[in-house]
Amino acid sequence: MLSGPSGVGKSTVVTEVRRTHPEIWVSVSATTRRPRPGETHGRNYFFVDHAEFAAMVERGDLLEYAEFAGNFYGTPRGPVLERLEAGTPVLLEIELQGARQIRASLPEALLVFLAPPSWDELVRRLVGRGTEAADVIARRLETAQVELAAESEFDATVVNASVEGAAADLVSLMGLSASDQR
């Protein structure tokens, strides 16, 4: 399970992991936020409305869920448990609230914190996205300070100084190596 502050590059690192290790199954989260340019329903996220998300929670369809920056995010339970039972390496990309739920519900999971090389770099990445209004960025930066303070709750930390290096470190923590590629 990979978590870290908004803007640290979680999605970018996961994309690199997928590129170099296609045998790792990456969970697709459900979210109530609107798609960003280039995002596809079912590939990047399952984009759902608030009513559908609430129904998923009510049915117990989510392994974890959390509210973040005014939107809800959650990990569909069934596909994750199916892959784990089949012995497939699984990677979840989730926020801090969800990470805490994973710790409680799947204590055997390896929780990895993705850290920025510096606070200034994190600010640069969030502002540089150009996808959100200034007030949303300000909220994300406030939340990032809280998330950075939670690093000690994780089993391991990977610093995202370079995408390739962070992805390789994450794959190594999963017990895989370059020679394990399929």
Image: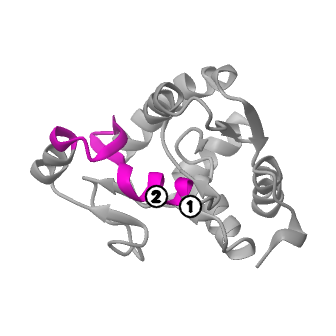
**Segment colored magenta:** 57-85
Q: How are the colours assigned in the image?
A: one colour
Real-space Cα separation, disc 1 to disc 2, in angstroms = 6 Å
Secondary structure at numbered mark 2? helix
Residue on which the image places disc 1: 86
Checking the image for residue 82, the label placed there is: 2
Secondary structure at numbered mark 1? loop
Instruction: Give the image location of residue 115, x and y in percent.
Output: 70, 39
| Quarter of the image with the N terminus in it | top right
Q: Residues within 10 Å of mark 1 (few under 14, many from 20)?
A: few
The residue sitting at the left extreme is 51
Q: Nearer the viewer, residue 20 or 148?
A: 20
Query: What amino acid is labelled 1 in the image?
Result: Ala
Quadrant for residue 182, please give it.
bottom right
Tell me what residue is drawn at x 90 percent, y 71 percent.
Answer: 179
Tell me what residue is drawn at x 75 percent, y 60 percent.
Answer: 163
Residue 144, relative to residue 121: is it above or below?
above
Instruction: Give the image location of residue 62, x and y in percent.
Output: 32, 45
Q: Is residue 77 shown in magenta?
A: yes
Question: Are circles 1 and 2 on residues that touch, CB within 8 Å?
Answer: yes
